[in-house]
Amino acid sequence: MSPIKPWPRLRRGLEHDFHVIKVRQDVVADPRTGHEHPRVLIESPDWVNIVAVTKDDQLVLIRQWRFGIAETTLEIPGGMAEPGEDPAVAAARELEEETGYVPGRVVRLGQVHPNPALQSNRCHSFLALDCEKKHEGMQDAGEDITVELHPRSAVPELIQSGAISHSLVVVAFFLERLHADAQGTR
């Protein structure tokens, strides 16, 4: 079997900037045949997600409206990292902005590519321990978030029941589980 070769970009398409993402359609060449193929690309800053746990082992979760599915979802806090911002700093900032909770310490869990077929960014996941409520949060314009506390032990049921359905949130909990297993804390 021959190795997979990169697909060279023949033409860069017109870019549409929607503030949180940029979308364009490039034309690439199949390295095996030379045939041209259009490919849609979505560019976005890196994202951060944070599994936040209070001192009494409660998860800090958020509920918000998601326009893609036209429903509310139960998620962990998260958002976009600013250009040049350390992802751990971005995660703690997003946690505080969305919930008013401040972490005692932040542990890196890992990163994934949200959808490498279309997107170039990464989603970094973190565990925030010993979180304390300091204020009511400072939501961005266009956000309408409610904060909910759930027992940490409820995660499997929340995922299996579909109460938590956001794939990147499920990944963050999986990475948190791998971290706990590696530390021998579960």
Image (cartoon, rainbow, N blue to C red):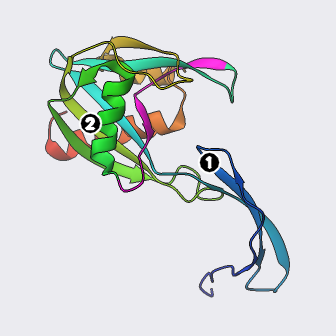
Looking at the image, how many numbered discs can be counted on the residues? 2
Q: Position of residue 23 (x, y in %)?
A: 70, 54
**Three-letter amino acid code of the residue under disc 1:** Ile
User: Of label 1 and label 2, which has the lower sequence position?
Assistant: 1
Q: Dividing the picture into quarters, in which one does residue 12 lie?
A: bottom right
* Residue 21's disc number: 1
Q: Residue at x 67, y 44 (%)?
A: 18
Question: Which mark, residue 127?
Answer: 2
Depth order, front residue of 31/88: 88
Q: Nearer the viewer, residue 133 or 173?
A: 133
Residue 46 placement (x, y as % from top left): 46, 51
**149 or 20, nearer to the observer:** 20
Front: mark 1 or 2: 1
Q: In the rendered image, which quarter contains the N terminus? A: bottom right
Against 130, residue 110 (above or below) is below
Please indicate whether residue 145 sits to the left or right of residue 105 in the image: right
Q: Is residue 168 magenta?
A: no
Please identify the quadrant where the C terminus is shown.
Answer: top left
Q: Is residue 7 left or right of residue 79?
A: right
Q: Residues within 10 Å of mark 1 (few under 14, many from 20)?
A: few
Q: Is residue 19 above or below residue 163?
A: below
Q: Position of residue 76 (x, y in %)?
A: 41, 27
- Could you tell me which secondary element the residue under label 2 belongs to? strand
Furthest residue to the right? 35
Q: Can residue 178 be seen in the rendering of this structure?
A: no
Write down the region rendered in magenta.
71-84
Using the image as rendered, state which of residue 154 and residue 41 is in the foreground: 41
Residue drawn at the location 56% of the way across and 51% of the way down: 44
User: Is residue 80 located in the magenta-colored stretch of the structure?
Assistant: yes
* Residue 149 sits above or below residue 170 on the image: above
